[in-house]
Image (cartoon, rainbow, N blue to C red):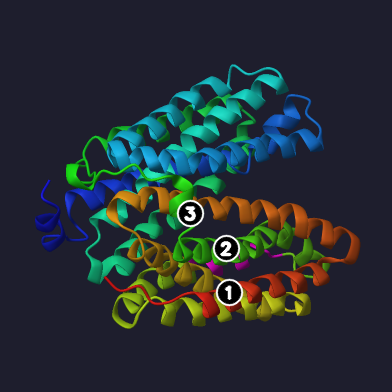
Amino acid sequence: MDSKKKMSEFSLLSRNFTFVCLSSFLYFGSFYLLLPTIPQFVADLGGTTSQIGVVVGIFTMSSVVLRPYFGKLADRYGRKKMMLFGSGLFALLFAIYSQVQEIVPLYLLRVFHGIAHGSYLAAVFAYVADLAPLKRRGEVMGVYGVANVVAMALFPAWGSMIIASTHDFSRLFLFSTITAGAAFLTVFFVDEIKPEENQKQTVSVWTVARQPAVLVASLTFFTAATVYGAVITFLPVYAPKQGLANIGIFFTTYAIFTLISRVIAGKLSDRYGRRKVILPFLILLTIATFLLPFLQSLYLLVLIGACFGLGFGAFMPALNAFVVDSTLPHERASALAFFTAFMDVGITTGAVILGIVGEYWGYATMYGVGGIVVSLGFILFATYSTEPYK
């Protein structure tokens, strides 16, 4: 495909963009079907609390460790090939879950599932970045992010409902297989994108990762993801302790404002620059985190949910676009794979490290520390980042 022609003719309703968004919606849907129910599955197998943690963590770890290398493969051989490999393996492995009867085989299955996850994510973010014209990059990446948000809003509730009403994990795994399989088939409808032959260069993943823009953006992302991990993990426990049983309103508010900000903030970053969007919305995220220790009313819970949705939903696509702006086409998948891995690392850090703070010093202190962490991310980005120009 002629990349210049592709760029000049790009439309949000184009076949490639429509199908890559649909594929991601289905892919993340299959992932979210299992997310709230995998602890129950482990418990049914006789697993302990620590084993539940290992089952969840080993998936994340295998995805994070190998994702930059899958990015390198996507840079070299093409995005579509790695998307097909990742989504196809992801669907196939879902079909095996119902055959698992013991914890140890489940560990191995989760490792391979994490590998598939890393492959798909490394390629799909680069694919969307390749599709997006420079002047609309933030807008396009923001709109693409809506697929994930909508899947998050729908599929966890569906998965929980299946188990609550039937307690039939085989049925859940069947639906997950079908949904992931549909994501795999959808990828066939997109055109391959890979660097031109004269752009193919052997670039080390760590050479790309050490570029100042990539490293600063990744560490900034890590600080925000750490707070995000602490919020989604512990707010359902913390809010009832503060007399707020209706925690669902937080996640509803968060989802609504995330959808709004994903689209609007992307356009703003295209028009005014990435830093002018990233920094203010990081401040908003910081304020929301510092408000959590004072949570005592439903109104404040809604306000915090709105600020979190606006802050995290807006700065993420702008930061994504910042990384793409700062790297060359043949480095893009490697850079984005390294960058997006810090989302998983941050969420794990928030759940584990900040969780320890919460256990010993209380949730209010934990969220106060979280506010300091994201403040450090703001200082880092404000001090060491520069607006990329092409």
Quickly name the residue at label 1.
Answer: 380
- Amino acid carrying label 1: it is Leu
Query: Within 10 Å of the Cα at label 1, are there few (<14), some (14-19), or many (20+) other Cα atoms?
Result: some
Q: Residue furthest right?
A: 360
- Of callouts 2 and 3, which one flags the residue occurring earlier in the amino acid sequence? 3
Q: Nearer the viewer, residue 138 or 76?
A: 76
Of residues 88 and 197, the one drawn nearer to the viewer in this rendering = 197
Q: Amino acid at mark 3?
A: Ala
Q: Closer to us: mark 2 or mark 3?
A: 3
The C terminus - image quarter: bottom left
**Which residues are drawn in magenta?**
246-256
Q: Nearer the viewer, mark 1 or mark 3?
A: 3
Q: Decide if residue 197 is on the left or right side of residue 78.
A: left
Asked if disc 1 and disc 2 are in contact, CB closer than 8 Å, the reply is: yes
Asked if 259 appears above or below 85 in the picture, the reply is below
How far across and down, in percent of the image, does residue 67 sit? Answer: 48, 42
Sequence-wise first label, 1 or 2 = 2
Give residue 14's position: percent from left, percent from top.
17, 54
What residue is drawn where x is 71% and y is 75%? 372
* Residue 21 visible in the current orientation: no
In this view, the residue in front, 121 or 231, is 121
The image position of residue 116, as x and y in percent, is: 47, 33
Q: Which residue is mark 2?
A: 219
Q: Secondary structure at mark 1?
A: helix
